[in-house]
């Protein structure tokens, strides 16, 4: 008897998953740590004319004497254009390195031009420093909170960030000592501590000279390298600059500086002041990344520093930012509901706001943007998910009138959120870490 014919079998189909990025399997492991900046992600919305943006830290260069800058650039092109528009040194041109040493002298730093490496802004300086010091899995210590751009760099090099507590004078020395010892007891490699001592981004607080000395003492005791990032140090409102940590130690501190805040960010010129052996590694890293920092920008800034009263111009900027700071503090005092606190910066660009328990700045942001005001949620400034009760406000770019309108809108949003939480009991239970001090501590205030 013949067997019945087998039924027709459908051909086996190979499963093909749809991916938005067909190269996903080809990327290096380090790319998994690359994430979009919360601030950059806000730009598309925050830059709409109807939105008052208290989010971005864009310098206000409206008071820059463009006629002076224009004539300086014209003379540069006509007089030294062939040199200024050519390739240059990987370390940076000698003339600008000499000028940078004069700028740093205002903060008590005595440096030699040979120990300066010019970079594409201080952001690249931070990238190069991390590149030459850190392997995947190494630990970097940062203040809690810390600069979002630094956290992005550390993530991109697969570092683990451990936050260290702050108070009204910035990084807490004893907390730094405890963190170093605890991590080393676990067998972890702690490569350096990253700190912004003057007019901190985002917290707005400033380390006193005594606090800087105490931090350096802990670094000496624990054999810890200090990375001092100082973009705002010359933009104080009430006093002369506090001596930089680098002025207290030549071999324990790597110092990062920039002209983006004291001149103009579009030239993209920053620098690293480092011990000689470190400088050699930085130059090699710079050459592999860019061959050389932008030569024309270096010549332009050198000419500006030589031909213009740049110290007087910094004072003009500082007074302009002081007026905006005062407008923001007045607006916060008038518009914030009960329970909201904030820091009172003595310079720089930022105010750090703490919300009442139960409010979440990240969850609240879409409603704030609907109310036509933007800020940066506090979670952007932590590597470990904290910061939901905080937000950063920037006063550097909007006019005082726009700042006051922004705080009014923000106050209405917060009042509405507080009322909803009170009515419906929608309090959020978020993980807690030690916070910056409340209104009864120096440098802060409350509505």
Image (tube, rainbow, N blue to C red):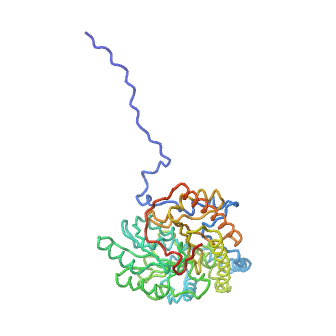
Give the farthest residue toward the left.
Answer: 1
Camera-side residue: 119 or 197? Answer: 197
Q: Tell me what residue is drawn at x 51 percent, y 56 percent.
A: 425
Note whether residue 214 is visible: yes
Residue 232, percent from left and from top: 57, 79
Name which quarter of the figure residue 55 lies in. Answer: bottom right
Nearer the observer, 374 or 337: 337
Q: Is residue 91 visible?
A: no
Hey, which quadrant is residue 424 in on the image? bottom right
Relative vertical location of residue 89 with respect to residue 12 in this rendering, above or below? below
Vertical relation: 241 (above or below) 445: below
Q: Position of residue 187 (x, y in %)?
A: 29, 71
Q: Establish if 233 lies above or below 434.
A: below
Quadrant (top left, top right, bottom left, bottom right) of the C terminus = bottom right
Q: Which residue lies furthest to the top in this view?
A: 1
User: Count of labels shown?
Assistant: 0
Q: Where is residue 404 in the image (x, y as percent from the top left)?
A: 68, 70
Q: Which residue lies furthest to the right in this view?
A: 67
Q: Residue at x 60, y 57 (%)?
A: 367
Task: Assign the N terminus to one quadrant of the image.
Answer: top left
In-image side of 187 versus 213 (left or right): left
Along the line of sight, the residue nearer the viewer: 4 or 108? 108
- From the top left corner, tell me how far across and down residue 193 is, in percent: 42, 76
Depth order, front residue of 288/354 = 354
């Amino acid at each position: 008897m013949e067997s019945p014919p087998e039924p027709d079998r459908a051909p086996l189909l190979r499963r093909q998953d749809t991916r938005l990025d067909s190269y996903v399997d080809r990327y290096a492991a380090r790319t998994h740590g690359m994430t979009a900046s919360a601030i950059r992600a806000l730009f598309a919305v925050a830059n709409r004319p109807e939105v008052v943006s208290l989010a971005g830290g864009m310098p206000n260069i409206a008071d820059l004497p463009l006629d002076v800058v224009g004539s300086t650039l014209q003379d540069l092109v006509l007089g030294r254009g062939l040199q200024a528009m050519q390739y240059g040194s990987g370390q940076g041109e000698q003339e600008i390195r000499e000028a940078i040493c004069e700028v740093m002298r205002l903060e008590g730093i005595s440096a030699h031009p040979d120990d300066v490496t010019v970079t594409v802004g201080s952001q690249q300086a931070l990238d190069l420093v991390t590149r030459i010091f850190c392997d995947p899995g190494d630990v970097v210590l940062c203040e809690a909170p810390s600069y979002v751009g630094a956290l992005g760099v550390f993530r991109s090099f697969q570092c683990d960030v451990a936050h260290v507590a702050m108070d009204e004078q910035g990084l807490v020395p004893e907390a730094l000592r405890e963190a170093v010892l605890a991590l080393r007891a676990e067998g972890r490699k702690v490569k350096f501590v990253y700190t912004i001592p003057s007019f901190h981004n985002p917290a707005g607080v400033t380390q006193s000279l005594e606090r800087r000395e105490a931090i350096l003492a802990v670094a000496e005791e624990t054999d810890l390298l200090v990375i001092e990032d100082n973009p705002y140090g010359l933009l104080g409102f009430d006093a002369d600059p506090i001596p930089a940590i680098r002025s207290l130690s030549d071999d324990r501190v790597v110092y990062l500086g920039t002209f983006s805040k004291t001149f103009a960010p579009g030239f993209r010129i920053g620098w690293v002041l480092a011990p000689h052996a470190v400088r050699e590694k930085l130059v090699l890293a710079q050459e592999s990344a860019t061959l050389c920092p932008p030569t024309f920008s270096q010549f332009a800034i050198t000419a500006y520093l030589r031909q213009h009263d740049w110290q007087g111009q910094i004072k003009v900027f500082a007074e302009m930012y002081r007026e905006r700071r005062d407008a923001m503090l007045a607006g916060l005092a008038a518009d914030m509901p009960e329970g909201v606190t904030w820091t009172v910066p003595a310079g720089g660009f930022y105010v750090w706001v703490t919300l009442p328990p139960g409010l979440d700045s990240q969850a609240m942001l879409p409603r704030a943007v609907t109310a036509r005001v933007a800020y940066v949620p506090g979670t952007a400034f932590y590597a470990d998910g904290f910061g939901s009760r905080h937000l950063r406000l920037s006063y550097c770019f909007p006019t005082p009138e726009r700042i006051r309108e922004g705080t009014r809108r923000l106050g209405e949003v917060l009042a509405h959120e507080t009322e909803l939480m009170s009515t419906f009991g929608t309090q959020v239970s978020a993980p807690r870490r030690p916070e910056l001090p409340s209104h009864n501590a120096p440098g802060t205030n409350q509505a």
